[in-house]
Structure formats: C-alpha cells, structure tokens
Image (cartoon, rainbow, N blue to C red):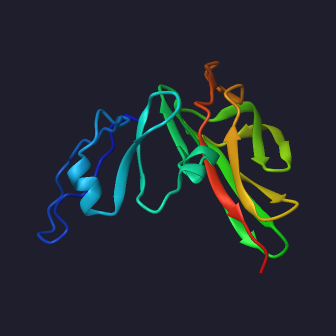
Amino acid sequence: MGSPSVANASEKTGTKKLVSEASAPMKVFGFDAAVAEQNGYKIVTLPNGQKTSVPKSATVQQIADGVMSNPVVDGDCGQSHVHFWATGGDYYGEIETGYDVTHSVAHFGWTVDVTDRFGVGSLKNSESFTPAKYSMTFFTHSGGNGYASAQLEAGSYVVLIDGEMCHSGAPWDDTFYYKD
C-alpha cells in the first residue's frame, strides 16, 4: 500500500514508459443529497449522530439492524476486511475475511463475531507465517431467517516479519439469512 510500482503505459506504440503509482485510503467527507436521491439513495442520521447513505427502500428497522456495512478498513499497516453473505439452504452463510498488509506475517490472531436475532457467536483462527495478502473462510448457520452481521474484532491482529504489530480496524458486513 503506497509503495511505487512500475506500469506499462503505452502498449499500442510498443514503447514502455515508467509510471509510478501510489494509493491512499479515501474517506467520506460529506454527502450530496440530490445525487443520492437521483440514484435511489437517501441520507440518514444514525443514532450515534453519524450520517450515512442507504437505499431508499431501507426501512428504519433495517437501518437499526445494520443493513449498512463497512467491509474494508484501511490503516497504516494495510487493510483488513470481512465479507458476509447468505448461501440459502437451511439458513446458512459464508464469511470471507483477511488482510492485505505491508510485509509477510509472522503470526496472527483473528476473531469474527456473528450476531443475529438468536445471539452472538465468535469464529476464531490463528496461524503462523502467512503471505502479506491472506484470507480465510468461515461457514455459519442461523436458527431462522433474518438479518445478521459479521464484525472482525478490533483486537484481531497480525505481527509482521519486520516486528510491526497491527490491529484490525473492525470492518463489518451484514446479510439476511433465508431458507430455500
């Protein structure tokens, strides 16, 4: 993240130009309500006072239950992510979570909390010597239909091979369990 890379900028002419590229996290600094309205969204204020954009079809209950998500969180070590989706069957779901950090990882400890109307469960993993970009999958099951969220605990961490210790920015995602 943020390190220069070389790219071929001119494939057609056969000449190669060296181009540097850098990236940095983008952060929301406001909302354009007119643009949101034109594209099927509305701006709402959450109970904590934070504003966010949601689909016009979102009900007050869905907003309160967490139908909005923040699945990727960037930081100065890299980023952590969690993606959660229902797979049907008899109220099953799948979670893909992981990190993309600046160096290979000596070891990590990872905990995802899954919350639905039946309670909270924690899914854990820890391993040693993984690549800098790594992901893992968890399978979930609920007792019935309804909204559910998966949040990577802020205490989830990686220790990089250069000794840096990095913790998760606590990304989260949600889904709706169903039976087919």
Q: Is residue 127 left or right of residue 65?
A: right
Q: How many marks?
A: 0
Q: Residue at x 80, y 66 (%)?
A: 92
Say which of 109 and 130 sits in front.
109
The residue lying at 71 percent from left, 25 percent from top is: 155
Query: Measuring 28% from the left and 36% from the top, which residue is drawn there?
Result: 30
Q: Is residue 175 left or right of residue 177?
A: left
Figure quadrant of the C terminus = bottom right
Q: Quadrant of residue 25?
A: top left
Residue 103, can we see it? yes
Q: Residue 177's x, y, as percent?
A: 74, 64
Q: Say which quarter of the image contains residue 21.
A: top left
Q: Position of residue 133 (x, y in %)?
A: 59, 45
Q: Is residue 17 above or below residue 131?
A: below
Foreground residue among 13 and 133? 133
In the current view of this chain or complex, which residue is farthest to the front? 60
Q: Is residue 84 visible in this depiction of the protein? A: no
The residue most toward the left is 13
